[in-house]
Amino acid sequence: MIKIEVFEAGSCCSAGVTNPAQKRDSIRFAAAINQLTLRGIDIYRYNILSDTAKFEAADAVMAVLTKDPNSMPITVVDGIVAKTHQLPGNDELSKWTNQPLEQGEGKQKIQLQIKK
């Protein structure tokens, strides 16, 4: 079975990012991880501040960081660096796992009826 690991920079806020576009991407990625995890795919997210040992144990990640300290997030698929500088997109996750992912269609619209 495939194993995907994402090594991310530490952040100062609980949401992980403060840039709105990055926050949306992080939420999209979390939803994709949830879908794949429920199907039995092994996907792990590591934060450099709380998972330092995982970073130190990943030779491929340390090699990338030595060359470019600003390369996070770093995605490793079965021990091989597959992507740097951005979280993987749903299309990439689907390709690596051979699993379709539901695509969000933007904001959900609801209709309210107010009766007096």
Image (tube, grey):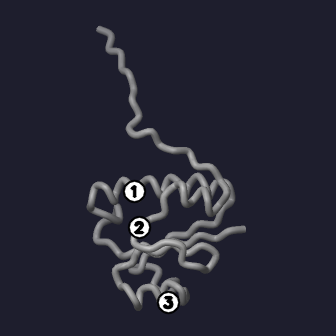
10 Å neighbourhood of mark 1: few (<14), some, or many (≥20)? Answer: some
Q: Which label number is shown at residue 56?
A: 3
Identify the element where label 2 is drawn.
Answer: loop
Query: Spatial distance from mark 3 to mark 2, Cα to Cα?
Result: 20 Å
Foreground residue among 23 and 114: 23
Give the residue type at disc 2.
Gln
At horizontal 36% and vertical 53% (from top left) the residue drawn is: 24
Q: Quadrant of the N terminus?
A: bottom right
Foreground residue among 14 and 73: 73
Q: Position of residue 61 (x, y in %)?
A: 49, 84
Height in image: 77 above or below 68? above
Give the residue type at disc 3.
Glu
Height in image: 59 above or below 18? below
At horizontal 68% and vertical 59% (from top left) the residue drawn is: 40
Q: Position of residue 59 (x, y in %)?
A: 54, 89
Quadrant in the rendering for residue 27? bottom left
Foreground residue among 73 and 96: 96
Label pair 1/2, CB-CB below 8 angstroms: yes
Q: Which residue bears the numbered disc 1?
A: 25
Q: Which label number is shown at residue 86?
A: 2
Pointer 3 or 2: first along the chain: 3
